[in-house]
Image: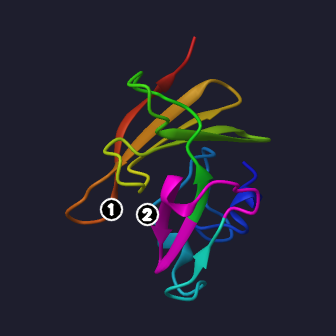
Amino acid sequence: MDMSFLGGDPLGDEPFDSHGSVSPDGIAATGRHDAGAVFEHPDASSGPEDHLWMHSDGRIWDLGPADVDTDDDGVPDSLTRTGDGGLAVYTDSDRDGQVDKITEVDGEGAFSSRVLDPGSGTWVATDTGRLG
């Protein structure tokens, strides 16, 4: 998938494993980023308080404003990004602005989801499967 919408790759030069899945724990990015750097979405027209963000290896990534309401409560909580290999949905399920769930769907219909463990700050796999 093309991660250029982030202004670079928050997870390293090659965030995808052999199955095309993102490794959101940032292990591949160790030593490649400047701690404390903030990267803003270039097309963002709303204020930063409306944006979703995530962090990896000491960097904070501004993904831009949420534009999808995945839990049908009337408040946008997610954004979707597409690329050659499929799509990724970044979700803030607790309304604090930080992405705490990532769901990926590849071009073949395989999906995987991960949630951010608030205690450890690591991403934990929750679901995998195939659509259709």
User: Which residue is located at x 50 percent, y 35 percent?
Assistant: 76
Tag shown at residue 25: 2
Residue pictured at 33% horizontal, 62% vertical: 122
Q: Please name the residue shown 61% across and 50% down the image.
A: 18
Question: What is the magenta range?
Answer: 41-61
The disc at residue 101 is: none
Please, what is the three-letter code of the amino acid marked with disc 2? Asp
Indicate the secondary structure of the residue bearing disc 2.
Answer: loop
* Quadrant position of residue 10: bottom right
**Residue nearest the observer in this picture, 80 or 104:** 80
Q: Quadrant of residue 16?
A: bottom right
Amino acid found under the numbered disc labelled 1: Thr
Q: In this image, 106 relative to 98: left or right?
A: right
Residue 17 appears left or right of 94: right
97 w.r.t. 30: above or below: above
Determine the residue located farthest toward the right in the rendered image.
84
x, y percent for residue 78: 51, 39
The numbered mark at residue 122 is: 1
Q: Is residue 59 above or below residue 23?
A: below
